[in-house]
Image (cartoon, grey):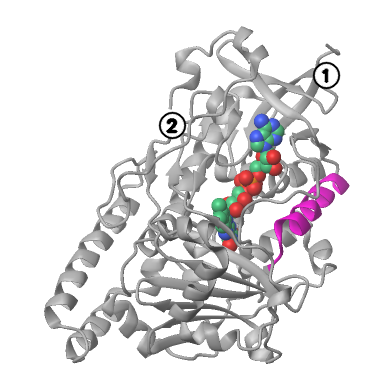
């Protein structure tokens, strides 16, 4: 084994969270080593839509010039259609950025790696985290294996797992089992194609259609002229998509007539293969402890139905760097600020977690939401679009007066039985009150499930097996891994 190396921070995982954390630390002159078992470019199963708030995070990371060099379609508007009602609005600008991009992960993530490297982060590809090093009940570094099979150790003030949903770092510090989880109702089935529409309005809009209980999406993507089409029906539909991809695809297009019109004349020879997943349970893990923290999906994952995961992973990486930067020379201060950061993360991410849990329920559109959309309509200023771009909290967008007006309007319409409107609205009101109360309580690691948001029955994968050598390492002391 080679001699022990020293670093300020070791990050495991070199994608959204890892690069967003490493770049500002390295820029500030800190030594940061980032390990990733993959070599880049490297793909990842994800539909990769970013709204304007996510693009602003790419700019903070220093990766935006590289992303723009890929010729992405810059998308300025979001549209939500639910049967006969719709909302079309511009995205809210963040730091002067008023557009979203949707860049396939193999193209996108290598830009993040290059940007972080350019700013001084040492990114080591084909390097697999094996186990933490422990000293006095605190994580004091990592042991990893490089692409040639050689083992190395690095000592560091902080080790961050930015290694995704099946985080080996979380498993090694005893935090793999989430303290809160929610089952996904919907699955994802998607593919790429040449965009059949040359209409600038189509090319400038992320569209979601809600027909019956099924969702469909069209995302103009990268390079310009390509289109990503996604279906999110019941998660059980994914097995049908795997058995008969083309038949499933045709059936889903037929279920969404407006999408079928958007795709009229599509050149089927430009289709990519169909990709799918039925397993996207949302969760929160304890994400800070002595000498360690978890950022990005490693610590928190939300249902992809609202397309917020990459943006939040970038946000988590950046904000964790900001918190730990002044504390890195004092282990006690590091442990205090990572805990404070975890609390701030939950405050920031909980509203979007609930919104995604609500949308992953496989049910027809809420009568109240339909009336909100009916009265929203086509606007030149962002309003409901803040539900996607996170310019305001959902409770600030769907205010009580607005919801009450929509409820009155839903009762006045003849097409939905009043009894159904009443039953749905009471359940939604109860849920929303509990969500608001939870936010006011501001507990650390709030684990109480909220009926209507946290869905029971989330299956969770087994933790990754520890590397054989890790079995020889001393077991972490219980107080070192306790939440
Ligand atoms: C089907 C699907 C669709 C999605 N669609 C969207 C969307 O449209 N928009 C959106 O914003 N988000 C979306 N998301 C969420 C988004 O993909 C994630 O939030 C995001 O990838 C998380 O980034 P990350 O950096 O935390 O982790 P990841 O992207 O998971 O990266 C983790 C990295 O860690 C590395 N790693 C793992 N273990 C080790 C180890 N032992 N040693 C070294 N390296 C290791 C991996 O190789 C990987 O490179 C979607 C997710 C899914 C599953």
Circle 1 crowding by C-alpha within 10 Å: few under 14, some 14–19, many from 20: few
436 versus 90 height, above or below: above
Towards the viewer: 379 or 344: 379
Most prominent secondary structure in the magenta stretch?
A: helix
Quadrant of the rendered image containing residue 296: top right
Marks 2/1: CA distance?
30 Å
Q: Reading the chain from its start, which is encountered first: label 2 or label 1?
A: 1
- Give the residue pinned by disc 2: 177
Instruction: In this rendered view, identify the residue nearer to me: 244 or 218.
Output: 244
Residue at 51% x, 78% y is 253
Q: Mark 2 Cα within 10 Å, few/some/many (few <14, many 20+)?
A: some
Segment colored magenta? 102-119
Report whether 429 appears left or right of 7.
Answer: left
Q: Is residue 114 left or right of residue 376?
A: right
The relative height of residue 408 versus residue 466 in the rendered view (above or below) is: below
Residue 186 drawn at (x, y percent): 42, 59
Q: Is residue 103 magenta?
A: yes
In the picture of the structure, the residue carrying the numbered disc 1 is 150
Give the SS element for disc 1: loop
Relative to 279, 333 lies left or right: right
Q: Position of residue 72 (x, y in %)?
A: 76, 72
Q: Is residue 186 above or below residue 263?
A: above
| Residue 162 at least partly seen | yes
Label 2 or label 1, whichever lies nearer to me, is 1
Relative to 19, is 464 on the left or the right?
left
């Amino acid at each position: 084994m080679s001699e022990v190396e020293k670093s300020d921070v070791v990050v495991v995982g070199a994608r959204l969270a890892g690069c967003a954390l490493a770049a500002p630390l390295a820029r500030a002159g800190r030594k940061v080593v980032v390990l990733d078992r993959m070599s880049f470019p490297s793909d990842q199963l994800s539909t990769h839509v970013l709204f304007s708030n996510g693009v602003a995070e790419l700019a903070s990371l220093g990766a935006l010039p590289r992303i723009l060099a890929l010729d992405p379609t810059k998308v300025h508007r979001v549209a939500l259609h639910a049967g006969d009602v719709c909302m079309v609005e511009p995205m809210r600008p963040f730091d002067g950025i008023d557009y979203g991009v949707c860049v396939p992960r193999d193209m996108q993530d290598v830009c993040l790696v290059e940007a972080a490297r350019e700013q001084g982060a040492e990114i080591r590809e084909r390097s697999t985290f094996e186990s933490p090093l422990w000293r006095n009940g605190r994580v004091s570094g990592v042991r990893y294996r490089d692409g040639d099979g050689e083992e190395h150790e690095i000592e560091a003030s902080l080790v961050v797992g930015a290694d995704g949903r099946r985080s080996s770092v979380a498993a090694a510090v005893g935090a793999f089992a989430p303290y809160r989880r929610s089952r996904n109702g919907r699955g994802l089935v998607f593919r790429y194609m040449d965009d059949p529409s040359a209409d600038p309005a189509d090319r400038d809009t992320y569209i979601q259609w809600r027909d019956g209980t099924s969702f469909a999406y069209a995302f103009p993507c990268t390079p310009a002229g390509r289109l990503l089409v996604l279906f999110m029906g019941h998660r059980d539909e994914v097995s049908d998509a795997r058995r008969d991809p083309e038949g499933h695809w045709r059936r889903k297009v037929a279920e969404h007539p407006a999408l079928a019109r958007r795709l009229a004349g599509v050149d089927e020879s430009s289709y990519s293969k169909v990709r799918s997943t039925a397993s996207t349970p949302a969760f929160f893990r304890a994400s800070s402890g002595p000498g360690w923290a978890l950022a990005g999906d490693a610590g928190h994952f939300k249902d992809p139905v609202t397309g917020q995961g990459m943006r939040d992973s970038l946000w988590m990486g950046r904000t964790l760097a900001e918190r730990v930067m002044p504390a890195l020379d004092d282990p006690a201060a590091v442990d205090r600020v990572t805990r404070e950061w975890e609390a701030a993360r939950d405050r920031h991410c909980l509203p979007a977690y609930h919104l995604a849990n609500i949308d992953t329920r496989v049910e027809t559109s809420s009568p109240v939401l339909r009336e909100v959309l009916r009265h929203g309509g086509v606007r030149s200023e962002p309003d409901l679009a803040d539900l996607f771009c996170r310019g305001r909290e959902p409770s600030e967008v769907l205010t009580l007066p607005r919801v009450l007006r929509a409820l009155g309007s839903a009762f006045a319409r003849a097409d939905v039985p009043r009894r159904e409107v009443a039953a749905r609205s009471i359940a939604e009101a109860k849920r929303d009150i509990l969500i608001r109360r939870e936010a006011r309580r501001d507990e650390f690691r709030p684990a109480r499930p909220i009926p209507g948001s946290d869905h029971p029955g989330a299956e969770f994968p087994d933790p990754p097996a520890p590397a054989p050598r890790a079995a020889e390492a001393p077991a972490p002391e219980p107080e070192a891994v306790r939440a």
